[in-house]
């Protein structure tokens, strides 16, 4: 792909008709051409941030590192005398507990960071600093050896890096209102999400073809891991950490070169008390805006549930269906391709119908997926016994992967677009900080409930029941959200 390509040709986005919210149509002349080119490059730089960051989620959170961590933790617990069944549940609970803590940190820091970025007029320095911290943490995931060495260190590094990665991503979202007109935002958001998922697909292909080994020590195409990595020490799979770090560092370059701050915003050095006062004022204002309040509350629940599906999809495949790394990786490719395609389609639907119908449809798809996950095991589906060796659970879960990736991508993209409809341009970072808070304020809830249900039921499947409940709550609250946002109210 040519980085100087017109986004409208690549992702269906008409970027030549505005420079931001309230912009006017450009006319002929050299100055207008320069301005149009600058806008297109700015959008592409913003697109590349999604591309650069996606492997932290695709390879780390879901399909490579998380299942590897679960397998290593399970083996370590068995070696300590825990039964295999209990060890699988305990390993999942260990992961969910760490995610709970990380979610709380993200939730309570995001609004303040957004308010500070708005008050200072600068987001880029924070985004770059947080991204570099994520690079360092990801690179050190190499230290998790198959014998359980550095298990807790690797767990800590992954989630610390995840916190920094999410902080950067939340601030990057605040550029969205300046990238197009109100009519274009949904399609731009969907295009960026789709572009990011294609990055996830490519990175996953690369890991499976060249690095991640199966039980026989070969990759998806039957070769040993490249660069002389030792399959006996699982060095191919462990390379996922340095791979994520290199990917993020390299593909962050277009963002650094092309995506700039809005020059109309004054830069200053805010005071701590001033930022807190402005943040508190915004929270009070939002509490008095019915549509914004309902949307943030709805997203608080359904995005928490979606994150849980992303975080535990690979672990579920490993612990319940006994899939190995390569099979989980193929599952991830299917999910990522579906996400890329349906995020783009969702962006088109968003532009034509608005984000609310896209969000509603996506949640219904997630409810179907959650029901299958809870009712399925290797031996039975919804209580109906399966013949020994049946492939039906595998086939169904591949479909679930496509639904999780596709509907999940469209759900997040449309939610980001809906937030723009509830955002004041002068407080974009602060508003998206509250958006991040809504997505993470109860981030402890899904992992904590999964942990509790896992302990009570001692079942990896029934532990997912809370995810269904959270989607239902979000769907109910969405009824009170105005399709065109608070300004329409």
Image: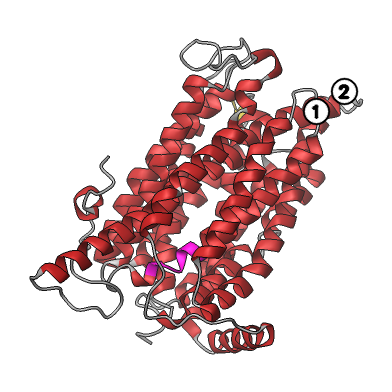
Q: Position of residue 192 (x, y in %)?
A: 36, 54
Q: Main secondary structure of the magenta part?
A: helix
Q: Is 433 situated left or right of 69 in this image?
A: left
Along the line of sight, which residue is nearer the eye, 256 or 233?
A: 256
Along the line of sight, which residue is nearer the eye, 318 or 380?
A: 318
Residue 419 among those drawn in magenta: no
Q: Residue furthest left?
A: 28
Q: Are marks 1 and 2 in contact (CB under 8 Å)?
A: yes
Residue on which disc 1 sits:
148
Classify mark 2: residues with Cα within 10 Å, few (<14), some (14-19) or many (20+): some
Q: Position of residue 413 (x, y in %)?
A: 41, 58
Q: Is 324 situated left or right of 46 in this image?
A: right
Q: Is residue 1 above or below residue 41?
A: above
Q: Is 22 situated left or right of 434 in this image?
A: left
Tag 2, which secondary structure?
helix
Along the line of sight, which residue is nearer the eye, 448 or 234?
A: 234
The label shown at residue 79 is 2
Q: Is residue 453 above or below residue 84?
A: below
- Please state the extent of the stretch shown in magenta in the rendering: 171-176
Residue at 58% over, 69% down: 438
Residue 172 among those drawn in magenta: yes
Classify mark 1: residues with Cα within 10 Å, few (<14), some (14-19) or many (20+): some
Q: Is residue 260 above or below residue 92?
A: below
Is residue 246 something one can see in this rendering? Answer: yes
Name the quarter where the C terminus is drawn. Answer: bottom left
Residue at 51% over, 27% down: 207
């Amino acid at each position: 792909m040519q980085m100087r390509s017109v986004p409208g040709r690549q992702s269906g986005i008409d970027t030549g008709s505005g420079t931001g919210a309230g912009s006017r149509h450009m006319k002929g002349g050299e100055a207008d051409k320069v301005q149009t080119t600058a806008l297109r490059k700015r959008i592409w730089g913003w697109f590349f941030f999604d591309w650069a960051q996606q492997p932290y989620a695709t390879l780390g959170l879901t399909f490579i590192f998380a299942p590897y961590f679960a397998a290593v933790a399970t083996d370590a617990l068995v070696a300590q005398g825990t039964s295999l069944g209990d060890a699988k549940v305990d390993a999942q609970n260990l992961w969910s507990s760490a995610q709970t803590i990380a979610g709380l940190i993200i939730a309570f820091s995001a609004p303040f960071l957004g308010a500070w970025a708005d008050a200072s007029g600068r987001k880029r320095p924070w985004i770059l600093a947080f991204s570099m911290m994520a690079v360092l943490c990801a690179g050190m995931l190499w230290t998790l050896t198959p014998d359980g060495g550095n298990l807790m260190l690797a767990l800590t590094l992954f989630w610390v890096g995840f916190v920094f990665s999410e902080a950067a991503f939340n601030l990057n979202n605040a550029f969205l209102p300046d990238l197009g007109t109100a009519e274009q935002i949904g399609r731009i958001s969907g295009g960026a999400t789709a572009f990011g998922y294609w990055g996830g697909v490519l990175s996953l292909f690369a890991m499976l073809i060249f690095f991640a080994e199966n039980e026989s020590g070969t990759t998806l195409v039957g070769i040993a891991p490249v660069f002389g990595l030792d399959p006996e020490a699982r060095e191919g799979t462990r390379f996922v950490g340095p791979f994520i770090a290199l990917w993020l560092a390299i593909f962050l370059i277009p963002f650094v070169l092309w995506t700039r701050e809005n020059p109309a915003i004054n830069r200053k050095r805010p005071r701590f008390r001033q930022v807190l006062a402005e943040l508190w004022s915004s929270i009070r204002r939002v509490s008095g805006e019915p549509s914004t309040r309902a949307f943030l509350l709805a997203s608080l629940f359904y995005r928490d549930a979606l994150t849980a599906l992303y975080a535990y999809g690979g672990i579920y495949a490993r612990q319940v269906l006994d899939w190995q790394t390569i099979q989980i990786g193929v599952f991830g490719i299917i999910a990522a391709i579906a996400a890329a395609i349906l995020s783009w389609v969702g962006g088109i639907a968003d532009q034509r119908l608005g984000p609310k119908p896209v969000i509603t449809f996506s949640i219904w798809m997630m409810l179907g997926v959650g029901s299958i996950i809870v009712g399925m095991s290797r031996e039975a589906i919804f209580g109906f016994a399966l013949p020994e060796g049946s492939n039906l659970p595998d086939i169904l879960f591949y479909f679930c992967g496509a639904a999780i990736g596709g509907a999940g991508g469209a759900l997040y993209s449309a939610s980001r677009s809906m937030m723009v409809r509830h955002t004041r341009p002068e407080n974009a970072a602060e508003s998206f900080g509250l958006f991040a808070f809504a997505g993470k304020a109860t981030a402890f809830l899904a992992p904590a409930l999964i942990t509790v249900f896992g302990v009570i039921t001692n079942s990896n499947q029934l532990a997912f029941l809370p995810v269904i409940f959270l989607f239902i709550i979000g769907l109910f609250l969405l009824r009170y959200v105005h399709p065109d946002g608070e300004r329409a109210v």
